Amino acid sequence: MKQMIIAVLLVGFSLTPIWADGQFRIAGYTATPVDALPTAGPAEWYELAIPTDQTMTGWQWEVIFNYLGLGMHYGVGFNEMVIDAASSTDWYMDWKGDFFLSYHVLGGGSVVDPFVEFGWGNVGTALVSSSEYADYPDWEDEVENGSAVALGFYNYFAGGVAVDLNGLLLGAKVSYIPSELAGPFPDSSIKRYALAPFEVSFFGGAALGGHRNWRERSHWD
């Protein structure tokens, strides 16, 4: 995994001249599912920035040309299923990945970059350790009785804002995942992964090339 991340960064930096009119972004992110968006004020929104046991962390990348972009998200999280505090518990790994298209209202590379996204992907969970096994669960047995895995497909709509400080990228977004556009895995023997209707994400990373406001300012000078 580390080698892949390093390779992506090296390729991105080596292609920096190509992004004179476009931009390549790579960032780490956190995504927390929520059942409803805050309505009481800034204090509730601040609480959403604090990770929970449902928060996934991962990487995202995006290629932007002028106002349009495309990219992917990859996230993972580990959850402990506590049944009896005095005994060993089960651990599950959750993952989530999607492909998305984006529209940047002021153009990619703007210092303040409001954007909207539409994406589609898959999500799942798998049992990775259990108190009933000395080592790891018997995968085939767990899949057969339906306790090992849950999968699902989904579509989402999102809106957010990024800040591009001449290459340093920071941002946040809110996603809406309509239940009517989230479906189970075609195999009926596999459980459906339950998705919350909303998700709040924060990200930070690097933006290579295409710094619109900085480039225009250099022309003025």
Image (cartoon, rainbow, N blue to C red):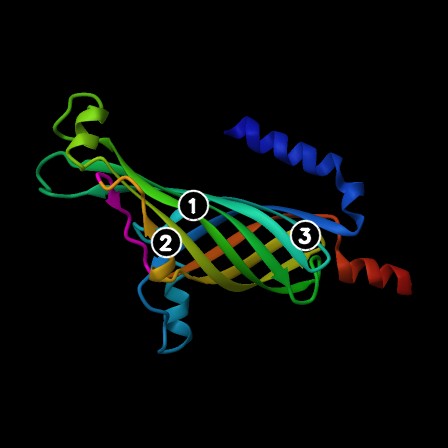
Nearer to us of marks 2 and 3 is 3
Residue 94 picture location, percent across and down: 33, 42
Toward which corner of the image does residue 36 lie, by quadrant? bottom left
Toward which corner of the image does residue 3 lie, by quadrant? top right
N-term-proximal mark, 2 vs 3:
2
Q: Is residue 137 visible?
A: no
State yes or no: residue 58 in magenta. Answer: no
Q: Which residues are magenta?
A: 189-196
Quadrant showing the C terminus = bottom right
Using residue 199 as the reference point, say whether residue 162 is left or right of it: right
Using residue 158 as the reference point, say whether residue 84 is left or right of it: left
For badge 1, the amino acid type reads Thr
Residue 156 picture location, percent across and down: 45, 58
**Residue 129 tag number:** none
Nearer to us of marks 3 and 1 is 3
Element marked by disc 3: strand
* Frontmost residue, 156 versus 105: 156
**Residue 57 tag number:** 1
Asked whether the residues under the numbered discs 3 and 1 touch, taking CB atoms below 8 Å apart as contact, a structural biologist would say no
Asked whether the residues under the numbered discs 1 and 2 touch, taking CB atoms below 8 Å apart as contact, a structural biologist would say yes
**Residue beneath disc 2:** 51
N-term-proximal mark, 3 vs 1:
1
Mark 1 closeness class: few <14, some 14–19, many ≥20 residues within 10 Å: many
For badge 3, the amino acid type reads Ile
**Residue beneath disc 3:** 64
